[in-house]
Image (cartoon, helix red, strand yellow):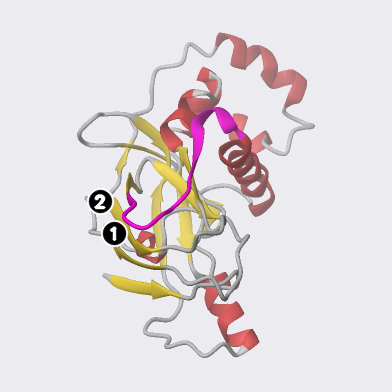
Amino acid sequence: MSECANLGPAVAQSNGTQIRVLSNSPPGTTFIAMLESPTTAGGDTLVSSSVRAYSSLSPRFRKRLEGLTAIHTNNDGVSQELKHGQQAVMRRGVLQAEHPVVLVRPVTKQKTLYVNPVYTKKIVGFDQEESDCILKFLFGHIAKRQDFSCRIRYEAGTLLVWDQRVTNHSQTLDYSIRDRRRGFRLTPLANKPIPAKIEEDDGEHWEGCRSAYAEKSPFAKWIA
């Protein structure tokens, strides 16, 4: 549990699963209780549904993602801290974990995308260029679709609860360092991510596309 006050634009929340995603037991349900908030607007939290992000993909693309795993690391963040000499206590160095690209929430059995642009760096088994293409699409798909996202505006007494396994979130950086806000955040760890089972695919359409696109596509190895 931590208390936050006088947070300015330089201290943005990460879009996704926070540092504990880099362990075998990433965060689960998260609670933010706002005790004090400025009367001016700003510093809102944007939350999007990773379940809806997954279900809105085409059936064939969903099947191709199931069974894949991706590398999550905080290497970029640690490098930036050291580069800019920010006064911070580095309790840990670079961390890395491998998690399913599509996981299943244990209680509801919903399938959800489990990637975010802060920590997810590479899909295992793909060349970096191939992985970058897929991840860039998924990051944009999650961030730009307003039909499965909402914006939370805080006031004193606001309690926000969300499940890190089925959502992505980010903070709007539209307020001054002089705007005081004070609150508490509690993030217990959840179970080890459960990968989604690969569904059967008759492959009829996929086989028809193979010869036409295999040589040109950056995903040639994927469809081989």
Residue 181 point in image, percent of width and height: 44, 68
Residue type at numbered disc 2: Lys
**Crowd rating for badge 2 (residues with CA inside 10 Å; few <14, some 14–19, many 20+):** few
Magenta-highlighted residues: 145-159
Q: Residue 85: within the magenta?
A: no
Residue type at numbered disc 1: Asn
Q: Nearer the viewer, residue 211 or 129?
A: 129
Residue 144 point in image, percent of width and height: 63, 37
Q: Which mark is residue 24?
A: 1
**Crowd rating for badge 1 (residues with CA inside 10 Å; few <14, some 14–19, many 20+):** some
Viewed as shown, does residue 157 lie left or right of 43?
left
Q: Is residue 222 above or below residue 39?
A: above
Q: Residue 146: within the magenta?
A: yes
Q: Which mark is residue 149?
A: none
Residue at (26%, 70%) from the top-left corner? 1
Residue denoted by label 2: 192
| Mark 1 → mark 2, Cα distance in angstroms | 6 Å
Marks 1 and 2 in Cβ contact (< 8 Å): yes
Secondary element type, mark 2: loop
Residue 132 point in image, percent of width and height: 65, 49
Q: Quadrant of residue 130?
A: top right
Residue 27 in view: no
Residue at (34%, 33%) from the top-left corner? 196
Q: Nearer the viewer, residue 77 or 214?
A: 77
Residue at (28%, 60%) from the top-left corner? 187
Q: Nearer the viewer, residue 4 or 28?
A: 4
